[in-house]
Image (cartoon, rainbow, N blue to C red):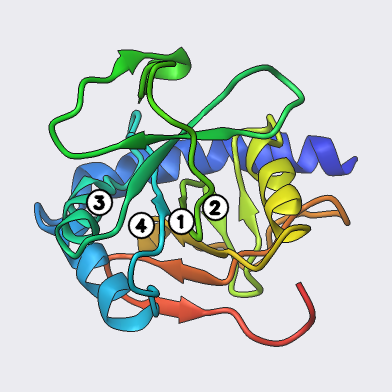
Amino acid sequence: MSLEDRKAELRREMGHRRATAASEAPADAAEAAAAKLCAAVVVTPGATVSAYWPMGSELDPRPLMRRLSDAGHPICLPVVVCAGLPLVFRAWAPGDDLQPAGFGTRVPGEDRPERRPNLLIVPLLAFDRAGYRLGYGGGFYDRTLAGLRAKGRPTAVGFAFAAQEVAEVPRDGYDQRLDWIVTEAEAIPIDGEER
């Protein structure tokens, strides 16, 4: 089976697993994950944070965004500009209007200024303890992280339910490792081989 076939099969399986995890999770799972991240991950004062507007059964990062915004961190949300290009990040604050975007998510309008995040909160379908994630197949976060890392060292945190863990995510040299995985159960630092 090819790498792409393995990824496609795992995406199908993990979509169902994540939906089940979301339906069975305690009501405070998103708050618990936010607390774990804030206790474990060092966020430099004033650092710009990118999160995502949740869609479907993704673990909701909005409690985390509120905490970080209240702590003085500028928040931005990712925007898909075009297939094959990196994401751009537009400023957002709690209470700001958002516009509908593809796949049921919402994004800041084109009038909002672009930002370069220092900390990225990244959605995913599956993760492993080596720091690899399985996304939705568009390669947006891999392209984006590669570009940001060529200009500095942002911290990338996968944000997910604990049930989304797998033994090993299928990967190749294009896939970018995360620095942390944070779930409602724990914060997992990714150490070891060079990223």
**Mark 4 secondary-structure assignment:** loop
Tell me: 52 left or right of 172.
Answer: left
How packed mark 3 is, by other alpha carbons closer than 10 Å (few <14, some 14-19, many 20 or more), is many
State the residue position of label 1: 164
Q: Earlier in the sequence, mark 2 or mark 4?
A: 2
- Looking at the picture, how far across and down is residue 48, in whole percent? 41, 56
Query: What distance separates the C-alpha of mark 2 from that of mark 4?
Result: 9 Å
Callout 4 amino acid: Phe
* Numbered tag placed on residue 126 in the rendering: 2
Task: Depth check: give the residue in front, 39 or 112.
Answer: 112
Q: What is the CA distance from the residue labelled 3 to the residue labelled 1?
A: 21 Å
Which amino acid type corresponds to the residue marked 3 in the rendered image? Met
Give left or right: position of 165 versus 23.
Answer: right
Pointer 3 residue:
65
Q: How many marks?
A: 4
| Number of other residues with Cα within 10 Å of mark 1, as a class: few under 14, some 14 to 19, many 20 or more | many
Residue at image mark 4: 161
* 3 or 4: tag closer to the N-terminus: 3
Residue 1 visible, this angle:
no
Q: Are marks 1 and 4 in contact (CB under 8 Å)?
A: yes
For residue 96, which quarter of the picture? top left
Q: Quadrant of the N terminus?
A: top right
Instruction: State which mark lies toward you, 3 or 2.
Output: 3
Q: CB under 8 Å between callouts 1 and 2? A: yes
Q: CA distance from mark 1 to mark 4?
A: 6 Å
Q: Which image quadrant is residue 167 in? A: bottom right
